[in-house]
Amino acid sequence: MKKVLFSLIFIFTVILSYSLDKPELMDEGIYQVQIGNYWRGKEYLEDYLTGEEDIEAYLYLIEADKKLGNLNHADSVALKAIKKYPEDTRALYERVLIRKMMADSEETGWKKDKYNKDYYEMFEKYLAKTEYTDSNKIFELGSLYFNNNLYEKSNEIFIKEKNYDERNLFGAATTYRFLGDYRKAALLYGQILQVNPEFYEAYLGRGISYQQMGDYGRAAKDFEICLEYKKDINLYLGLANMYINMENYSSAKEVLQRAQKDYPASQEIKSLLIEVYSKIER
């Protein structure tokens, strides 16, 4: 019974496809993909593309193949669309997504490594093709590199930001900091704060950069500002230690007393406070 029903549906689909003209084939194919009938949509779109060309038909055919798990065919369709419409970057980005899907479908092994490598390379190619105008995609790839501890690659992506997207400026500043270029990091954090003084994470990043450069005075100011936005035991301890490094024990004591009110059970704060008291009494 199921075989008969499938045959009837197939025959009906074939008859319907012959009764539609070319524009209607594309419209029906797109509609079928949109409602989740991927096989039927794929058939209509492939029929349409036998004699016509339209980037939207290619994109929806790629989507149907992706949903059906036909990743190699989706990739070949995307490659064909890129050749026919070289100025339209959407098919190129589809190849990026397809490589990610291929990598995710492999648990381990050389294929997974290869697909991941292709994914990053194609993503960079896409960004270059779009002249790094898509801040969201810059953030996506820069973050992927950063999360995989590829700080140099991450920095190369983040510094291409052209629209002053603060997420990417922050990413560039943070990767500079992780790479040990604290001066560039501090300058970029400062640029963010000039535009958005409420971006308290930039105070923290700049404070750490100043601290690494040995500029404890400016670092302490940034840590103090950051604490106005967010209470954090590590911030308190870092700030207290900076005052200790400057031999400003009274300020260290005041910071630790504030910290003790917020974190009364902390042994770290208690021990450091005892140390500061001993310095003051000398």
Image (cartoon, rainbow, N blue to C red):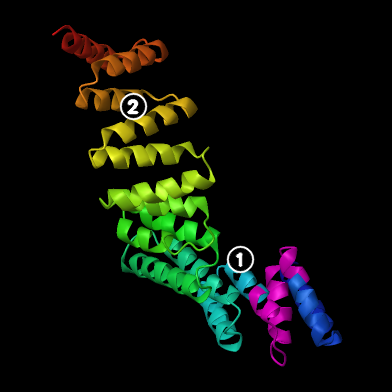
* Residue 7 locus on image (x, y percent): 75, 76
Quadrant housing the N terminus: bottom right
In this figure, which residue is indicated by the disc labeled 2? 234
Query: Label 2 sits on what residue type?
Result: Asn
Range of residues picked out in magenta: 31-59
Q: In the drawing, what numbered circle is on residue 67?
A: 1
Residue under the image location 32 percent in, 56 percent down: 151
* Residue 281 locus on image (x, y percent): 17, 6
Q: In the drawing, what numbered circle is on residue 180?
A: none
* Residue 166 locus on image (x, y percent): 50, 51
Quadrant housing the C terminus: top left
Residue under the image location 49 percent in, 72 percent down: 126
Query: Label 1 sits on what residue type?
Result: Lys
* Residue 173 locus on image (x, y percent): 38, 51
**Residue 117 occupies which quadrant of the picture?**
bottom left
Q: Does the magenta stretch include residue 51?
A: yes
Q: Residue furthest left?
A: 282
